[in-house]
Amino acid sequence: MAEPALVVQPQNDAAAHPDAWAQVLPLPCRLTVDVPLPGFTVADALRLHRSSVINSHWRVGTDIPLRLNGELIARGEFEVVGNHLAVRLTELV
């Protein structure tokens, strides 16, 4: 099954000058969701296997940081969409 594509509409001057961004728009980048796991140890990591469930102690509705190539760009919250775990953006930084 193919991964759904992420479509992001520019929210700044990029929208007014799309030609200026044409060369960089297709460049790959890494989007990560940071979920702290207090008390998680190397021993815990070694016990991980398919279908493992990790208790993050992260409260529902608490904003989680989203990073693009390591830089904080937004905050969001987890949401279930069908059989997938998704992140809904709540704030652009």
Image (cartoon, grey):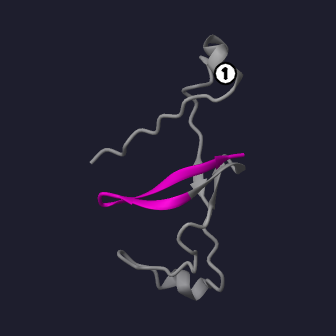
Whole-percent x, y for residue 10 in the image: 61, 28
Q: Nearer the viewer, residue 40 or 48?
A: 40
Quarter where residue 86 is shown = bottom left
Quarter where residue 14 is shown = top right
**Residue carrying label 1:** 14
Whole-percent x, y for residue 81 in the image: 35, 56
What's the residue at 64%, 29% (across, down)?
11
Q: Nearer the viewer, residue 82 or 50?
A: 82
Which amino acid, by three-letter code, is at mark 1?
A: Ala
Q: Residues within 10 Å of mark 1 (few under 14, many from 20)?
A: few
The magenta stretch is 77-93
The secondary element bearing badge 1 is classed as helix
Q: Nearer the viewer, residue 46 or 25?
A: 25
Residue 17 versus residue 52 in the image, above or below: above
Whole-percent x, y for residue 58 in the image: 58, 75
Residue found at the far left of this picture: 1
- Dominant SS of magenta comes to strand
Say if the magenta span includes residue 87: yes
Whole-percent x, y for residue 7 in the image: 47, 34
